[in-house]
Image (cartoon, rainbow, N blue to C red):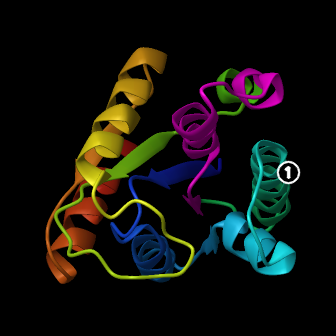
Amino acid sequence: MLKRIAIIGPESTGKTTLAQDLANHYSTLWVPEYSREYLAEIQGEYSYDDVLNIAMGQLEKENQLAKQCSEYLFIDTELIINKVWCEYKWKTCHRWILDRLMDHHYDLYLLTDYDLPWEFDPLRENPDTRDELFEIYRNELDDYGFEYRIIRGQGEERLTNAIEFINMLMC
């Protein structure tokens, strides 16, 4: 049975690298962050409604790739990210996102700590609020009662920590 593992956390905390490395380690697939593709396409300021389009596109890509996996699928961001972003930036969230948060199941969340140095990227917006956003994500996971582990460490240590959690909780 397929296990879906979502990787969430503030910007520049190694989510993409971790998703790729875990997929390589477990010889499976990972779902890239759809917002990067979407924002590159619109090439400009994004709106509240764009976040809904991003959420829908992310979930569609995830469901497509899930059909090709049997054991694990690693997801680089998911609906909590979209919910928090809507609420953080616009103080409200689309009903579609809120409804899917409870319906769409993940076996484990890996919450990436902000213990990595900030790396500039033109799509990143919040170098000074990673600690605040980390706590918001942690509170969301707690409020929903989702199973999660915090991933800390530099380089190989970060990957090893994630693998240990996955092996401990999923095997």
Q: Residues within 10 Å of mark 1 (few under 14, many from 20)?
A: some
| Residue drawn at x 61%, y 35% as measured from the top left | 83
- Can you identify the residue that label 1 sits on? 53
How many numbered discs sit on the rendered protein? 1
Image-based side of 106 in relation to 19, left or right: right
The amino acid marked with disc number 1 is Asn
Q: Which residue is at a point 33% across and 66% down the rendered structure image?
A: 13
Q: Main secondary structure of the magenta part?
A: helix
Left or right of 24 on screen, residue 56: right
Q: Position of residue 162 (x, y in %)?
A: 28, 61
Vertical arrangement, residue 108 with respect to residue 154, above or below: above
How far across and how far down the image is residue 111, in percent?
35, 49
Viewer-side residue, 153 vs 5: 153
Q: Secondary structure at mark 1?
A: helix
**119 to the left or right of 157:** right
Quarter of the view holding residue 58? bottom right
Look at the image and give the residue range highlighted in magenta: 72-99
Q: Residue furthest front?
A: 45
Q: Position of residue 69 (x, y in %)?
A: 71, 65
Can residue 115 be seen?
yes
Q: Where residue 38 appears, x then y in whole percent?
A: 80, 70
The residue drawn where x is 39% and y is 37% is 137
